[in-house]
Image: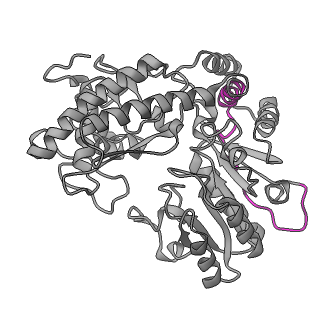
Amino acid sequence: MTLHSSPFPISADLQKRAHRLIPGGSHTYAKGDDQYPILAPGFIARGKGCHVWDVDGNEYIEYGMGNRAVGLGHAYPSVVKAAMEDLSRGCNFTRPSPLEVECAEQFLALIGTADMVKFCKNGSDATSAAVKLARAYTDRDLVAYCGDHPFFSVDDWFIGPTPMGAGVPEAINNLSVTFRYNDLASARALFAKNPGRIACCILEAARTEDPKDNFLHELKRLCHANGALFILDEMITGFRWHKSGAQKLYGIVPDLCTFGKALGNGFSVSALAGQREYMRLGGLDHYDKPRVFLLSTTHGAETHALAAAMATMKVYDEEPVIERLTAAGDRLRAGLARAIARRGLGDYVTLSGRSACLLYGTRGKDGQPSQAFRTLFLQETIRRGVIAPSLTVSYAHGDEDIDRTVEAIDGALEIYARALDDGVENYLVGRPSQIVQRRMNVRGEG
């Protein structure tokens, strides 16, 4: 891709209009202008496989894949076909669609650890419903979540204690406590400090490291010994670690679990699943405990989204999707490791995480994490036709795409090395990007 001096004129106009009309300029903070360099496409017009085209006609190989929601690749034919066929018959009726039963049967058979499921539209609704269910079942108020994992929900129980908790009463914040991943002692201390008050522990099955010393199993035992529920958030690990979720890979059966993102290959569908003993509280056939208003969303079971989920699950069940994600990620990791070593940047650019869900880290001359160098890295990869907020591959990333990416990043690393010597300000165009969860905005960041 050849960029000229002003490669994004249409994007620039749309950005001005967007910020007048939409808080933050987009409907997802992670997609906001403050997360990217000045020299970045502002709007993506279309995608096919692992390639996307911005509104100005520039083409890129994309990573991140819709914040990990697109596991098969953009506009995957069988998924699009299923959604369009069902959409032509209507998408939302006064009574349930038979697809709600069929999709539930398919999902529960694929996951294999849960008895019941409720579908909804996003991850926040699913995790918040899990927390509500745990509170109702245990009749307790405190929620313990893993403080090493960056995001669980936009709702008060999680977002309140974060730097972006404006608008959440302090009394609500005091109902959330945190423990550390792979640190059973930190969870044990929470239960000791708050006897009889913790309703659940919620965490991702894994992020950049696998559970050590049987951590997940030991945490579940600790929860049950203290009368709390054990909840796994599989928004990211689901359909990446294993077609049946990381819980299958690690051999753990959670009380409740949540799935989303890649479940519909980009279509809006998520799921709360779990054991009947807990899930029944949201139903009609129990009489021993109060009813729980669990999940009841007007658009929660739109038929085209469920059809997309069913088509997606079918591909995962019949094709080597997980194996391809791992192989593509392995090839990418190996190529980038060689490029990092060749440029002498091992102390400044790091790779972490499972191959199917790679992350990178950027450090400055002082060896500390650096947003300025992250922004420079993004700027230079975008110049070379790659958008990489993370290094998350899809089923559509072929060897040629991976090799072109390695070549592009190698070129970006050459600039990175120069910036370490000459100063990042001499190579970065405009302001650095920012982290999403910050208390205040910074002037000139948009």
Instruction: Please identify the quarter of the rendering in which residue 326 is found.
Output: top right
Looking at the picture, how far across and down is residue 406, in whole percent?
35, 27
What's drawn in magenta, residue-wise? 285-314
Residue 379 or 295: which is nearer the viewer? 379
- In the visual, does 172 lie left or right of 128? left
As for residue 45 lying within the magenta part, the answer is no
- In the visual, does 118 lie left or right of 213? right
Q: Is residue 446 visible?
A: no
Give above or below for 439 relative to 319.
Answer: below
Quadrant in the picture for the C terminus: top left
Q: Chief secondary structure of the magenta span? A: loop
Instruction: Please identify the quarter of the rendering in which residue 317 is found.
Output: top right
Looking at the picture, how far across and down is residue 337, in whole percent?
37, 36
- Taking the spot 74% from the left edge, 53% from the top edge, the residue there is 252
**Please, which colouring scheme is shown?**
one colour
Residue 253 or 12: which is nearer the viewer? 253
- Taking the spot 58% from the left edge, 47% from the top edge, the residue there is 123
Give above or below for 86 relative to 367.
Answer: above
Looking at the picture, how far across and down is residue 11, in whole percent?
27, 27
- Taking the spot 34% from the left edge, 42% from the top edge, the residue there is 32
Give above or below for 101 relative to 383.
Answer: below
Looking at the picture, how far across and down is residue 150, in whole percent?
47, 56
- In the visual, does 387 lie left or right of 283? left
Residue 177 or 374: which is nearer the viewer? 374
Quadrant in the picture for the N terminus: top left
Residue 288 or 7: which is nearer the viewer? 7
Q: Is residue 329 visible?
A: yes
